[in-house]
Image (spheres, grey):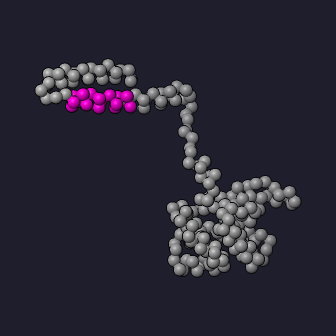
Amino acid sequence: MRHNKKFNHLSRTASHRAAMLANMSVSLIKHKRITTTVAKAKALRMYVEPLLTKSKDDTTHSRRVVFSYLQDKYAIQELFGQIAAKIADRPGGYTRIIKLGARKSDGSEMCFIELVDFDENMLKTSGKKKARTRRGGKKAAAKAEEAPVAEEAAVEEAPVAEETAAEAPVADAPAAEEAAPEAPAEEAAEEPKAE
């Protein structure tokens, strides 16, 4: 019985599979995106993500552990330098698989596998999020727009009244008293409009 043996052997011997995944990992680290079959990409994701997590801890031990898998010192420099700095705050999920469709020759499902933090196009689109709408339709949207505008208008008028009272000289105290009662009257007149 093959219980709990879930990883894909990819129709290869263990040594062939390990060498292929190591080479694909090095290519992914150097080029940030590679094109391959979906089955190989899923196997590569399981192989390379623990190595990327290991690269966050830049110690001699972690470098030697990753080197035992990859056997390429230039890939190790790239991984522990530029890549580790970009993925430092990401808690996993360092790769993305984007399906491309079937290959012409044999019909294999093809895909891109790429490092998430190095795709400029996806980073630009992910920054903009659509505002969520509700079923209320136009009435709810109109009320939502009016409420912040009314609050801003009330906030802007209150400091103006305080400034006029503060600008009045001490000698003209009666003039300041006359200006002060007028300001609350104006606010009271505009408050019902906001409601």
Q: Residue at x 63, y 61 (%)?
A: 115
Tell me if 185 is positioned left or right of 15 in this view.
Answer: left
Q: Is residue 163 magenta?
A: yes
Residue 47 drawn at (x, y percent): 66, 70
Tell me if 111 is positioned left or right of 181 in this view.
Answer: right
Residue 92 drawn at (x, y percent): 57, 63
Q: Residue at x 35, y 28 (%)?
A: 154
Residue 178 drawn at (x, y percent): 19, 20
Q: Is residue 57 above or below residue 105?
A: below
Q: Is residue 98 above or below residue 44?
A: above
Quadrant of the image occupied by residue 51 = bottom right
Query: What stretch of residues is rendered in magenta?
Result: 152-167
Q: Residue at x 71, y 73 (%)?
A: 23
In the rendered image, the quadrant that contains the N terminus is: bottom right
Q: Is residue 179 above or below residue 24?
A: above
Tell me if 72 is positioned left or right of 177 in this view.
Answer: right
Residue 179 drawn at (x, y percent): 21, 22
| Residue at the farthest right position | 105
Quadrant of the image occupied by residue 128 = top right
User: Principal SS element in the magenta part?
Assistant: helix
| Residue at the farthest left position | 171
Q: Residue at x 37, y 28 (%)?
A: 153
Q: Is residue 123 magenta?
A: no
- Report the number of numbered marks: 0
